[in-house]
Structures are given as C-alpha cells and as structure tokens.
Image (cartoon, grey):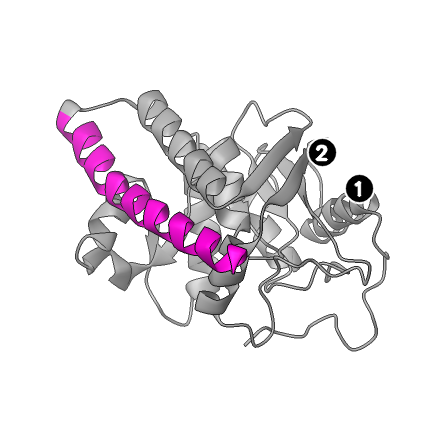
Amino acid sequence: MIGTLRALARLMRIALHMLSAIWLTWRMARRGDDFEQRSRVRRAWYDRALWIAGVRVRVEGELPPRPSLVVANHVSWLDIPLIGSTVDPCFLSKAEIARWPIIGWLARQHDTRFIERGAHQASAHVEAMRQGLDDGRHFVVFPEGTTSRGEFVRRFHPRLFAAVTGSGHPVQPVALDYERAPSGQVPASYADDDRLVVSVWKLLCRRETPVTLHFLAPMETADQERRDLAEGARNAIVGTLGLPVDPPSGRQTRRAS
C-alpha cells in the first residue's frame, strides 16, 4: 500500500516535470541560450527527474574533459537519464521522430542527430557519431546491443568503436553500478520480456534506487583497433563491477524482445 501511494505521488510530480521540459526548452530557444547554458539546464532536468523517481546517484572518477565516446554496460532504460545527468551527451534517433509533434521539436532543440532508415544504417550511425565528436559533443553507446539483468556483461560489438578509431577522440568507459539482489540480478533492470510501463511502476514503488556511476580511465584511440578498444572497455567495466569475465554460455548474443 505504501509503495502504491509513493508511486502515485511520484507519477504526478514526474508528469509536471515532463511539462516543465517543454517550457524550459521554449525559454532557452527564445533567449538564444548558448551551449553551456543549455547543457546546464539539461543536466539539472535529468538530475531532478531521477531524484523525483527515488534514484540516488553517486559519481566516482573524473568526467571526460574532451569529446569522448562514452561506453557503458546496459541494464535499464534508466541508463540514459543517468548518463545524461552527468555528461550531457548527444543521442541518435530515427529520422521520422524529427517530424513528430512536440517530441520531434524537443529532440531537434536538444541537438539530437537523426538517422535515415536503410541498408547503410550502421555506417550512418558511425558517421553521425564521428561528426558529433568533431563538433565537440560526447556520444553515448551501449556496445552490448541490448540490456541484461546486471549479473553479467555481454561482449561489446566492435563496430561502434569505428567512430573513434584513428580520430584522436578517446573512449570513456563508464560502469553503471546498480544495487543488486543476493542472486546478483539488478531489481531495477529492464530486459527480456519486461514491459516498460510495469518496469517504471516498480521503480516508482521502491523507496529508493541507489546507483553509482564509475567514470574509469579514458582510453586513447590512436593506433588502436576497434576490437581491442571494445575488449579493453568491457574488461575495465567488468573488473570494476566485480562480474565474471565470460558471460554465461548461450547468453553472449541473446537479444531483448
């Protein structure tokens, strides 16, 4: 009963907070705020949203001082606002979203990079990330390709690291360290056949959800092969989280529904 009342109260506050995003974005556009001002507002908005939802965030390590490819283990839909509250990265989106009412406008105003669907979508992703990095923005990717329950980290797909090979932009590994149950699984995870609405409701019912973001030593990319970068970033994250180096047999490439 207490959890249900807590979730309802938080849901109302989050709805108001979502509406504030429209007003804040309109105000920034009208005033012509520069990048630093917009970045500060975005990070504060993410931080407030997480606080309302009961997510308690701790950051360890140094934030990347220059444009970086930020790579992290993937556990939940929460991963995006968690990283957004710290480094204000660029995000990639399908091109059709740019034409959606309100959402498309918000995405355009907040520097989302749009990708057309097609046979060369993978290379378009890499090129968009490379251009964003050259423009001075961080980019976040989850090289596992899908989420897990948090008890292991899947192999990282090397293809995404092509955005930084030979570019001089570093790779910034981030270990997302959620509270785990005795089984090793993360209660706040979102994977397999989970439904988003149910996952959000369960999170809002919890008294609090502690998460630590470990910003690990950046990896220089000059003269590095993308496969080596993928393996090195994954090993650093796995070591920090204290998880097995090898995923359980048969789980390496499993996709979430």
What residue is drawn where x is 52% and y is 55%? 2
Is 103 on the left-hand or right-hand side of 144? left
Q: Circle 2 sits on which residue?
A: 216
Q: Nearer the viewer, mark 2 or mark 1?
A: 1
Q: Circle 1 sits on which residue?
A: 240
Could you tell me the amino acid type at mark 2? Answer: Leu
Write the start and end of the magenta stretch as one range. 1-30
Label 1: how many residues lie within 10 Å, few (<14), some (14-19) or many (20+)? some
For residue 184, above or below residue 254: above
Could you tell me the amino acid type at mark 1? Answer: Thr
- Tell me residue 197's x, y (percent): 44, 67
Q: State the SS at label 1.
A: helix
Which residue is the extreme one toward the front? 1
Q: Quadrant of residue 24?
A: top left
- Tell me residue 160's x, y (percent): 57, 54
For residue 218, above or below residue 204: above
Dot 2 and dot 1 residues touching (CB under 8 Å): yes
For residue 215, above or below residue 142: above
Asked if residue 21 lies in the magenta stretch, the reply is: yes
Along the polypeptide, which appears first: circle 2 or circle 1?
2
What residue is drawn where x is 69% and y is 27%? 61
Quadrant containing the C terminus in the rendered view: bottom right
* Main secondary-structure element of the magenta-colored stretch: helix
Asked if residue 144 lies in the magenta stretch, the reply is: no
